[in-house]
Amino acid sequence: MRIKYNAPTVLTYTLICAIVVLLSYTLLPGLAVNWFMVPGRGHFSPVSLRNWITVFTHAAGHANWGHLVSNFSLILLIGPMLEENYGSVPLLVMITITAAITGLLNIILFTTGLMGASGVVFMMILLASFTNFSKGEIPLTFILVLILFLGDQFAKISNTDNISYFAHIAGGFCGSLFGFFFKSRKK
């Protein structure tokens, strides 16, 4: 029996995020904050290349190991199924678009920085409910996931616990759109 690198996009994304946290806590303190956290409104400079890079890279930065584990326990559970269903490159495109949308919305709407893959997690949760989607139908599982997960996030949006519930909602919205518009390889 051999170990298979079964989901290259998900596994590579996981590895990159783990390396960022490891380097931030050892050789390169401040790496995550400087290169993997998108600044909020009032702190974002449109002429700063670093700020534009963080619009995408913030989804690979995590505050600590607990933050990383909470996001990637779900990504490693759901991601391989999505990667098999949609393909490695389309999933990478979905992750990148979700990172950009959550990053840009954070710049526009909030003064605090944003880091982490939770927008990607919620994108994958909503996208997973589309795995048995047929044209002209809306899966009941999608409706229930939408109500349960996004309803919970809307209820918590005013909390002051350093969790970006808005990024979760934006990620879920991205996953919903991807479910409708990205074609599954299995169909």
Image (spheres, grey):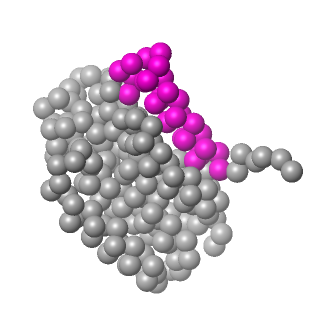
Q: Left of 13 or right of it: where is 175?
A: left
Instruction: Please tell me in which quadrant of the rendered image residue 187 appears.
Output: bottom right
Foreground: 33 or 48? 33
Residue 12 visible somewhere in the drawing: yes
Q: Residue at x 39, y 19 (%)?
A: 29
Expressed as whole percent of the image width and height from the top left, the position of residue 59 reads 40, 41
Instruction: Please tell me in which quadrant of the rendered image residue 54 appears.
Output: top left
Q: How many marks?
A: 0
Q: Residue at x 40, y 35 (%)?
A: 64
Q: Residue at x 43, y 66 (%)?
A: 126
Q: Is residue 148 above or below residue 110?
A: below
Q: Is residue 86 above or below residue 137?
A: above
Toward the front, the furthest residue is 66
Toward the right, the furthest residue is 1
Q: Main secondary structure of the magenta part?
A: helix
Residue 56 visible somewhere in the drawing: no
Expressed as whole percent of the image width and height from the top left, the position of residue 89 reads 58, 48
Q: Left of 126 or right of it: where is 102?
A: left
Q: Is residue 28 shown in magenta?
A: yes
Q: Residue at x 32, y 27 (%)?
A: 33
Foreground: 131 or 148? 148
Question: What span is colored magenta in the figure?
Answer: 7-32
Q: Is residue 167 above or below residue 86?
A: above
Q: Left of 10 or right of it: where is 62?
A: left
Foreground: 26 or 105? 26
Q: Left of 39 or right of it: where is 32?
A: right
Toward the top, the furthest residue is 27
Q: Is residue 109 shown in magenta?
A: no
Expressed as whole percent of the image width and height from the top left, the position of residue 42 reads 13, 32
Expressed as whole percent of the image width and height from the top left, the position of residue 60 reads 44, 37
Foreground: 143 or 149? 149
